[in-house]
Amino acid sequence: MRRLYNWTMNFAAHKNALWALFIVSFIESSIFPIPPDILLIPMILAAREKAWKIAAVCTVGSVLGGIAGYGIGFYLFDQIGLPLLEFYGKAHKFGEFQAMYNEWGAWVVGMAGLTPFPYKVITIASGVTALNIGTFIIASILSRGARFFIEAWLLWYFGDPIREFIEKYLGLLVTGGFVVLLGGFVAVKFLM
């Protein structure tokens, strides 16, 4: 784990790191299970003076990836989603779910955007239920932007003490991160 951390810290200072962060942020919002924070945090710790630029790139990549996830849900539901619902005998409940989701959609997108909950699930679900695209985009910008800019501010403000804490408790933090990620997927299974 220590070698991976050291590699990530070295990569964070690389000239193409912002592009890599953009790509990871984009695909995480639609298909990839690893959150962009894995790059965002070391990049800010490696270059605190660029914290706001890094957070902005992460936010833009994440929101654009969220729009792609929305498109996956919106355009592929009839081909993939509906047959799966029919296979499991749940197609008749979809209208009920859609009405409830659209009533609370902005809040769902906002909460998922701020938390470690798998955001791609919400982006795809938003497309499947045809949540108003404007509502989806605004909630995504506000929530994802808040999450990444708050992280950036904390890392910028506290800097070296945060880095020392991460380096000291790396194993525990990674384990906790995986537990939270796994918990998000378990929540999806039981809530949807």
Image: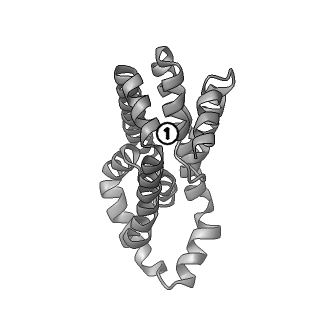
Residue 20 visible to an observer of this rendering? yes
Residue 43, percent across and down? 54, 27
Q: Residue at x 45, y 39 (%)?
A: 137
Vertical arrangement, residue 44 with respect to residue 124, above or below:
above
Of all residues, the one furthest to the front in this rendering is 168
In the picture provided, is 122 more to the left or to the right than 80? left
Vertical arrangement, residue 139 with respect to residue 152, above or below:
below
Question: SS for tag 1?
Answer: helix
Q: Residue at x 52, y 56 (%)?
A: 124
Residue 56 visible to an observer of this rendering? no
Characterize the local packing of mark 1: few (<14), some (14-19) or many (20 or more) Cα atoms within 10 angstroms.
some
Residue 69, percent across and down? 56, 50
Please identify the quarter of the rendering in which residue 95 is found. bottom left
Between 175 and 21, the residue placed more toward the observer is 175
Q: Residue at x 47, y 51 (%)?
A: 119
Between 108 and 10, the residue placed more toward the observer is 10
Q: How is the image coloured?
A: one colour
Residue 130, percent across and down? 47, 56
Vertical arrangement, residue 7 with respect to residue 132, above or below:
above
Vertical arrangement, residue 35 with respect to residue 46, above or below:
below
Residue type indicated by callout 1:
Asp
Q: Residue at x 35, y 45 (%)?
A: 110
Quadrant of the image containing the C terminus? bottom left
Check disc 1 and report the residue beneath it: 37
Between 105 and 26, the residue placed more toward the observer is 26
Q: How many tags in the picture?
A: 1
Of all residues, the one furthest to the top in this rendering is 49
Between 61 and 103, the residue placed more toward the observer is 61
In the picture provided, is 143 more to the left or to the right than 133? left
Residue 143, percent across and down? 37, 39
